[in-house]
Image (cartoon, grey):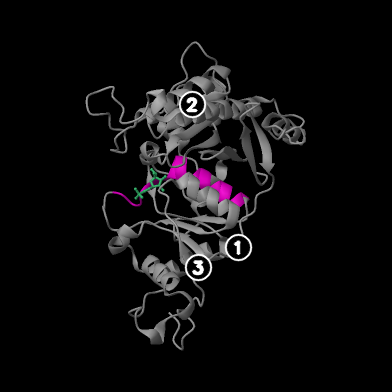
Amino acid sequence: MPLSTNRSTLTQFLIEERRRFPSASGDFNALILDVALACKGIARAVAFGELGGVMGNHAATEGGTINVQGETQKALDVLSNEVFIRRTEWSGNLAGMASEEMDLPYQIRAQYPRGKYLLVFDPLDGSSNIDVNVSVGSIFSVLRAPADVEATGRDVIEADFLQAGAQQVAAGYALYGPTTMLVLTVGDGVNGFTLDPNLGEFMLTHPKMQIPADTHEFAINASNSRFWETPVKRYVDECLAGKTGPRAKDFNMRWIASMVAEAHRILMRGGVFMYPRDTKDPAKPGRLRLLYEANPIGLIMEQAGGRASTGERPMLGVQPTALHQRIGLVFGSKNEVDRIERYHAEPIKVELSNPLFVERSLFRV
Ligand code: F6P
């Protein structure tokens, strides 16, 4: 077995980062280490699979429970949510929490002190993949609590969490794949840590991750194509047209249906991910959630030199209006996200199937 002695642990990394801010109290580092411990716990539960007795739908009520998103909760969704809460609420670092699995903000229980941060998370993303043994992950975002929350320790309300993505203090995800990884940004680049199963420690294995600006790989759920808006159709059609099309290169397509796994692939080798706004269900402006999916993944992308967008504008500038708000999400290699935004901005003049009007033709649309 290889020894990890020449690598930094997550703890060492955080302490060395903190030395840049001599006045920092250490609360933030303690919070991130608690989140990392929650992720280790979830990684073990996921790894035991059927043996752990937590597979399938949540059985608290007959036939499973439904979360605020109207989705059937898996037993592991509920367990993972509990792990996040129990591992983080005791420390006095949090003013409150919000999660995909909880309708309302979570209040830190009375026996614990309250702190200055808000933790927002999707405890188990891609959970439809659990039963088929495909990678899943956890996503988290750390926000600063509003000043009056910090000063008074009052209960948190939905409005306290409605902060634009650019306000995030930190964001990250854990990927439960062939190896367990924690990918983290504290606003100074993106660093990846691999769980050393011998030591039970996250070790810095992927310092300063950077996303290539160009790619020939895209990810989208093509079964929704009849609901896509014209700019998305145009982008995908051009990719599919390959070498003989307007892009003059062949593209590859991937769809894992676990956003964390797609984000990780893109961080490692570039690519673009799209779950755009579409016309499938007028009540849902997109499938993914702004506060605990799009914003944390968006901050990671931007910090790694990539981009995240609604399709029309930068994701991190969006002012949230609801805790469980959905939004169209496009992220990955910078030049591709720029292109998709450009397609949304350009007026639609002609039928795109007309070869006279495709890109690099006489009459560019
Ligand atoms: O809930 C989010 C999620 O599971 C993502 O991880 C994933 O990208 C997406 O939903 C999959 O959506 P679909 O079921 O449309 O493929």
| SS state under label 3 | helix
- Marks 2 and 1 sit apart, C-alpha to C-alpha, by 34 Å
User: Main SS of the magenta segment?
Assistant: helix
Res 169 → quadrant: top right
Check disc 3 and give the amino acid type: Arg
Q: Which residue is more in the foreground, 243 or 277?
A: 243
Label 2 Cα neighbours within 10 Å, binned few <14 / some 14-19 / many ≥20:
many
Q: Which residue is more in the foreground, 138 or 302?
A: 138
The C terminus appears in which quarter of the rendering? bottom left
Report the residue that reaches farthest toward the left. Answer: 62
* Point 64% across, 38% down: residue: 193
Check disc 2 and give the amino acid type: Phe
Position of residue 355 relative to residue 142, above or below, is: below
Residue with the mark numbered 2? 84
Earlier-in-chain disc, 1 versus 3: 1
Residue with the mark numbered 1? 213
Earlier-in-chain disc, 2 versus 1: 2
Q: Which residue is more in the foreground, 22 or 10?
A: 10
> Which of the numbered marks, if any, corresponds to residue 339?
3
Percent from the top left, x then y, of residue 204?
A: 68, 38
| SS state under label 1 | loop
Q: Are marks 1 and 3 in contact (CB under 8 Å)?
A: no
Earlier-in-chain disc, 3 versus 2: 2
| SS state under label 2 | helix
Q: Is residue 193 located in the magenta-colored stretch of the structure?
A: no
